[in-house]
Image (spheres, rainbow, N blue to C red):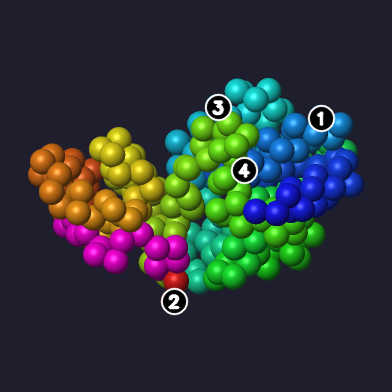
Amino acid sequence: MSEDKITKLDIILKDLESFVIAFSGGVDSSFLLHRAHSLQSLRIVAVTIRTPYMPVREINEATAFTDTHGIDHKIIDVPFPKNIRHNPVERCYLCKKILFSKILDFSRENGFSHILDGTNADDKGEFRPGLKALKEMSVISPLADAGLTKKEIRTLARKAGLELWDKPAMACLLTRIPYDTEISDGMLRMIEAAEDLLLESGYPGTRVRVHGDIARIECMPGYIEKIIHDPFREHLIYNLKKIGFRYISLDLEGYRTGSMNP
């Protein structure tokens, strides 16, 4: 990896001087936040949005990260927006507009000049309607602007001693539900409980996609054989049904981003 990309990232951050970083607790935004904090001369704050469709675990991990590194961190609570309650195809766009408007308000009220997010160079090649909203709101994506890919960011995070360098990607819980489906809080809590159960059972990064009363499990590479032969598989199935699912299925294609996209 060219050192030019890190140099470019540092130049971008130093030129901005004062900014809010939209902080999800994932690898990308964590690395960006840590790098900005290490430059010392910058005025920064991490802002995490807490909604009913963000896993509680992610909020807790974001808080733990900022506490560990002594970084100023604010959490803004946002109720479930009515215009995405039916999970429309344009959900990500609508959601980003709402959530980042809250961050924009915070930024203005506290005298910060810019808003940054953790979008990387790979993200721009995927189906991500939310990026349009970020562009419209003048949100800056330094990692993408510096040309840093997900793989490069993980490598840099590991070199920086960040324990989360290999943390699986995480998206909001709405991505587990088909479009044009009315979403209940109970449905979200079922998904969260199921994914927490699978994580605790040794399957990090696993997605539980919901189709009515069916849980469709998408495992990370290498976990399909493991879960099939898991001696505790029946116990796992029992607990998933106890959460509220009637049928438990294993997707043989495994985990892939955007599997619910049209």
Sequence-wise, which precedes: disc 4 or disc 1?
Answer: 1
Can you identify the residue that label 1 sits on? 40
Local crowd size for mark 1, using a 10 Å CA cut-off: few (<14), some (14–19), many (≥20): few
Percent of width and height locating residue 76: 64, 38
Sequence-wise, which precedes: disc 4 or disc 3?
Answer: 3
Left or right: 144, with 10 as reference point: left
Establish if 34 lies above or below 67. below
User: Does residue 142 appear anywhere in the picture?
Assistant: no
Percent of width and height locating residue 128: 57, 67
Instruction: Indicate the amino acid at tag 3.
Output: Ala
Q: Across the whole image, how many numbered discs are drawn on residues?
A: 4
Instruction: Indicate the amino acid at tag 2.
Output: Pro
Taking the spot 24% from the left edge, 64% from the top edge, the residue there is: 252
Left or right: 163, with 199 as reference point: right
Q: Helix, strand, or loop for circle 4?
A: helix
Can you identify the residue that label 3 sits on? 64
Magenta span of residues: 247-260
Percent of width and height locating residue 58: 49, 39
Local crowd size for mark 2, using a 10 Å CA cut-off: few (<14), some (14–19), many (≥20): few
In this rendering, the label closer to the viewer, 2 or 3: 3
Q: Was residue 8 drawn as part of the magenta stretch in this picture?
A: no
Can you identify the residue that label 2 sits on? 262
User: Does residue 200 appear anywhere in the picture?
Assistant: yes
Taking the spot 70% from the left edge, 27% from the top edge, the residue there is: 71
